[in-house]
Amino acid sequence: MRLLCRGREILFPRRPLVMGIVNLNDDSFCHDGTLNICHAFDHTKRLAHQGADIIDVGGESARTNRLPISAEEEVSRVRPFIEAFEKEIASASPKDEEQIWPPLLSINTWRAEAARPLLECGGDILNDMGGLPDDRNARLCAETGAALLIMHTLAPPKVPMTDARYGDVVAAVEDFFLEKISMAQAAGLPFEQIVMDPGFDFAKQKEDNLRLLGATRRLVGLGRPLLLPLSRKTFIGDVLGLADPRDRDAGTIACIAAGIRDGAAIFRVHNVLAAFQAVKICHAVLRASTSDSSLPLL
């Protein structure tokens, strides 16, 4: 399986990728955001040195209890980061020889009016958290060569969906991806430029999230890399009884191990070092167990 990202090619099977989070905002749910671009780049280089294969940068928190910012404000926050990324990351160094280097840059936005000016500045992936309601972001990625990360949701990120219910959440997510992949391809986006994200905690209840994680192998069967953004999610806190997201890293690692077992390709995390270590050891175990046909070769 190939993933094409603006002239770069990632071939799977391989060790799963770790995506580190950079929040250019002041209201992140983990309180790790900043509006100071120098601080953001210090954090970025730290994530890269800890093993991040992808840096995911966004200018707006997806928290529904915070007001949205304008597309203009979002662009003004993120554009300087994109413009300076290549120069800034050059002073960092990879953690090992398997890390994607330099790291891919993912632009976390969903509004087409913000996505276009940002991708025109650079970036390898467009992380669309809006559920791809129309084909504008797919056409933009087709034009620029960027990969498109499609997240399952039922509404834009700032719209609360706490009452969403499904007869079969796995079938609903699977049907969603089939529909959105077809839409993206009809807009001219190659199949090899698409990544899928089940959208944990977005329009989903605790049991929905657990069922989706348990159905990783089924979603992987759709033929595109599956990203699991599990880091510190509410459902982990619900299971463990942990209200503070910063206390959920051990639960996050357990979920990552489950995802690796079933073939997930990318993990979006806050604690990159812990995730890198988990991914590296799980991959080594699976690689040593290739004679067991019940285990996926990653």
Image: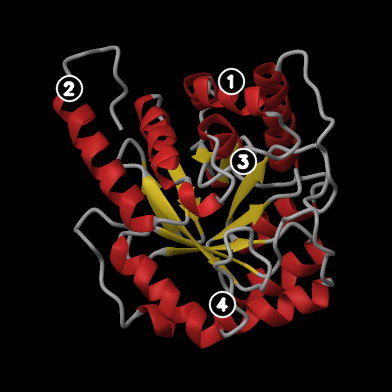
Q: Nearer the viewer, residue 233 or 130?
A: 233
Q: Which amino acid is tagged 1? A: Arg
Residue 38 on image: x %, y %: 50, 87
Pointer 3 residue: 234
Q: Which amino acid is tagged 3? A: Thr
> Does label 1 or label 4 sit earlier along the sequence?
4
Q: Secondary structure at mark 1?
A: helix
Pointer 1 residue: 211
Seen in the picture, residue 233 relative to 206 is either above or below; the reply is below
> Does label 1 or label 2 sit earlier along the sequence?
1
Q: Secondary structure at mark 2?
A: loop
Q: Which amino acid is tagged 2? A: Ser
Q: Nearer the viewer, residue 128 or 253?
A: 253
| Mark 1–mark 2 distance (CA, rounded to whole Å) | 26 Å
Q: Sort mark 3 into few (<14), some (14-19) or many (20+) by Cα contacts within 10 Å.
A: many
Q: Sort mark 4 into few (<14), some (14-19) or many (20+) by Cα contacts within 10 Å.
A: many
Q: Secondary structure at mark 3?
A: helix
Write down the quadrant of residue 89 in the picture: bottom left
> Does label 2 or label 4 sit earlier along the sequence?
4
Q: Secondary structure at mark 4?
A: helix
Pointer 4 residue: 82
Single out the mark in the foreground, 4 or 3.
Answer: 3
Q: Is residue 246 left or right of residue 177?
A: left
Single out the mark in the foreground, 1 or 2.
Answer: 1
